[in-house]
Image (cartoon, rainbow, N blue to C red):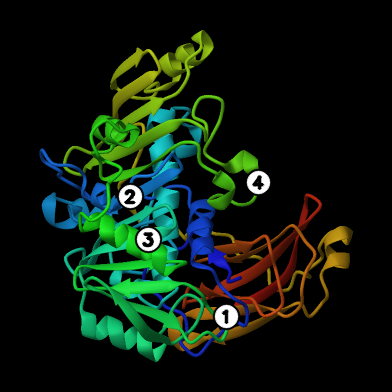
Amino acid sequence: MPLVPERPGHNDRSPDRSARLPMTLHRRRFLELGAAATTVALGGCLGFGDGEPPYTEWVPKQDGGIRVGYLDFSIASEAENGDELLPLILPAEATGGSRQVLTGVSGFDDIDDPLLTWPLEVGGGLVAGGFLAVAVSGLGYLVDPERPDRGIEELFTTDAVAVGRGEIDLDEATETLRSGAEGIVGGVPFEETGAIEDFTLYETSGDGELDGVTAISEQAVLVADTREQIRRVVETAGGDRTRAIEDGTTFEWLVEAAGDGHLAGGWVGPVDLETVYFGDPAERPVDELLRSDDDVLGSVTFDADDSEVTAELAARRPLTDSAAEQFESRLGSASEDRSISIEDEQVTATGTYSEGVLDFELTSPDRTTTTRPDPSEPVDPPEAVAQAVPADAFEFDPEAEKDRVKVGITKDLNVEKVAFEAVVSGYEASTTTPQADMYMYLYVDPDGDTVTVTVTVDGTSGVVARREFPE
């Protein structure tokens, strides 16, 4: 399994196309990784008008278990200063862009208001998984928030399928797939294996490096585990299958009540979150209020001109007096203006938040206060960590011309977590399943940086390796 960045900088780097991983990589796993690794994703302005949100055209009707995440990139051309909302907390892959740009969200961890935090966390996580699924094919360059009018303009997931809609240069995308151009797991060539309607299908040669299917047309890119998943979504968008948005369905009610936003996410329950959020169950976006068995959808709308965020949420679940009181007291508790309706088994809420509550303006990381570890200070992890990690468990391969360091794991490790950090640039990555031959690119500050590797064993953490760059 590849290592996946938890909090990268802006999308301005791509891994070496010559690098390979020897294990099978499943597309569904990338959807899971994105959901687990991403906390907040900000972006795009979407004016739906009187119609349905465009992502609903691709969601097939089924009995429960529907998950959707959606993000639009068009705000850069639709609102003054709208480009300040587009840098995403997503795994770095797309080319171009300013490497110093990050989206700062101050005070988010201190906000106990699920009306705002729930759609940010769920929508952002699902969209991040969709991005990873696209990027693993080497097509991550199609996602460039600074150029939303080129490539993928809307990115969303419907269960195990990632969909990127926009204007796709078929010649470039085809050459990228066939040549095995750079992707987040290294260069893996694809070959054409068929077609579904207007989409051409591509799969790897079957040598075990990467499974799954990538489908491209002039209007969209789709990635999934199987052809049947691709077919179901394509036929739904083409009108040959029933859509989940059909009259009278729970999904239709959710979308009408709270799905008309710039970033959206949620599900029609019951859903199995173990297939989406791996790791500690306590970190999944559910509690006694919003559960995996419930039907819930949330969205946020960004007003770049007025520095305001509007959040909407709809939920359908059995309501006890205690649950109703919690909804009443918690939804919109941090907003300046809210409305909430609780009736029978349905809850809807809307709230408006100023930048005083949530600062979503563009920021540049302040490295003037960053304290770099003293390189002369010895690495001295706790005994439990030192015993679990051999001295030569990690190797560092700097690539100065690309301002990055390839950090590889040389041995299987029986530990809880391995975390990597470039201290000055702020680039981070981690894995809870460290194996030999796994690697990660960390992008470092060209003026000097320190890369650290921290291992956690039975709740105890310690730095086990540290390198200065340039060396």
Residue type of the residue flagged with mark 3: Ala
Q: Which mark is residue 60?
A: 2
The CA distance from mark 4 to mark 2 is 30 Å
Tell me the crowding category of disc 1: few under 14, some 14 to 19, or many 20 or more residues within 10 angstroms, Cα based. Answer: some
| Mark 3, residue position | 162
| Residue 89 in view, yes or no | no
Instruction: Please determine whether, in this image, residue 304 is positioned above or below residue 453.
Output: above
Q: Position of residue 123 (x, y in %)?
A: 39, 46
Q: Residues within 10 Å of mark 3 (few under 14, many from 20)?
A: many
Circle 2 packing at 10 Å, graded few (<14), some (14-19), many (20+), is: many
Sequence order check: which comes first, mark 4 or mark 2?
2
Give amino acid for label 2.
Pro
The residue where tag 1 is placed is 406
Q: Earlier in the sequence, mark 1 or mark 4?
A: 4
N-terminal of the two: label 3 or label 1? Answer: 3
- Would you place residue 247 above or below residue 351 in this image? below
- Reading the image, the residue beneath label 4 is 280
Mark 4 vs mark 3, CA separation in Å: 24 Å
Circle nearer the viewer, 2 or 1: 2
Q: Quadrant of the C terminus?
A: bottom right
